[in-house]
Image (cartoon, helix red, strand yellow):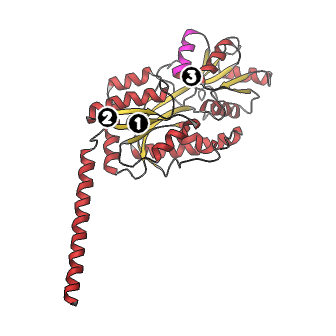
Amino acid sequence: MATSKRGLNVLVQVCSIIAAFALTNIAASADNQYPSKAVRIVVSFAAGGPTDTVARVIGAKLGDMLGQQFFVENRTGAGGNIGADMAAKSPPDGYTLLMATVSTHAINPGLYSKMPYDPVRDFVPVAQVGVTPILLGVHPSVPAKDVSSLIALVRENPGKYTYGSSGLGSILHLCGEQFKALAGGLQITHVPYRGSAPMMGDLVGGQISMAFDATPTAMPQAQTGAIRALGAGTAERMRAMPELATLSEQGLKGFDCYTWNAILAPAGTPPAIVDKLAAAIIKALEDPVVFRRLQEAGVDPTPGRGPKETADFIKAELAKWAPIIKASGAQVTN
């Protein structure tokens, strides 16, 4: 009886090993066959905006490369939190991805009193796609031709000038606060709007004095003379406007303000799928057509940044923006 029982135990162990081996092979096979159906890219902002454009350009190229459709689903609200949370809670099988932004993974964690997801623990980085530069523009009536003359003008007239943003706690608001701080504590009144489009309309109309804005909306206005571009917000000069000196070059050392996009997957997504996607995205960004289309949308592509580089970048962005948000006093209670 004891011998029979031992034999049964051995049989159960053998069957368990065989089952585990079979499941491992099935999982490996599924990873190798990825993608076998359409892949969803969640965009936390409205269709037609910069993030949506980036997702559609990259998604179309990935579809061509990997043989399955990569489609965009816009889930807006709560500054990007709704879409990001939906992606974080999706099955970690590679069929739901998030086009993350500076808002969803650097600003909102310090801005919102309660976050529905953890920007680091709930995602696995796949690849960074690009950076969208921001420039400082003033209304033509403002008698400043560069950043140093603007700073001098504001110091001589504390409280007289205003700057607009796309909303309280937005990246454009924080760019303004960073500018004020690095310039020694300027007194400029913040005027928040519901988006960058109405803000730019008022800047062109002269209702506000100045604003930081992303190149897709600011550059055309600067090129037509509707606003005067005083400096690029990025650490390096913009590819689209190489003649425009950066704020850092003009005396504000360390000023570096921009938006960005990176593709992330839900935590637990198999490494083989993450690596396959990362390799495809990096290759897509090396395509001259994709590169040019992103540049035309005002985005500076960032090829060669895979999972590790993207993870390090997001952690650095969280550390960078936390003290700026705190200093601004902006907070959303939810």
Chain part drawn in magenta: 216-225
Q: Characterize the local packing of mark 2: few (<14), some (14-19) or many (20 or more) Cα atoms within 10 angstroms.
A: some
Label 3 residue SS: loop
Numbered label attached to residue 283: 2
Question: Which residue is label 3 attached to?
Answer: 245
| Residue picked out by circle 1 | 41
Q: Quadrant of residue 224?
A: top right
Dot 2 lies on which element? helix
**Image: 271 above or below 135:** below
Q: Amino acid at mark 1?
A: Ile
Screen quadrant of the C terminus: top right
Who is closer to the viewer here, 141 or 10? 10
Query: Residue 183 placed where, x, y %?
Result: 70, 31
Q: Quadrant of the N terminus?
A: bottom left
247 left or right of 241 in image? right
| Numbered disc 1: secondary structure | strand
- Say what amino acid the circle numbered 2 marks: Lys
Residue 17 drawn above or below residue 126? below
Q: Amino acid at mark 3?
A: Ala
User: Residue lying furthest front in this view?
Assistant: 1
Q: Nearer the viewer, mark 1 or mark 2?
A: 1
Which residue is situated farthest in the top direction here? 224
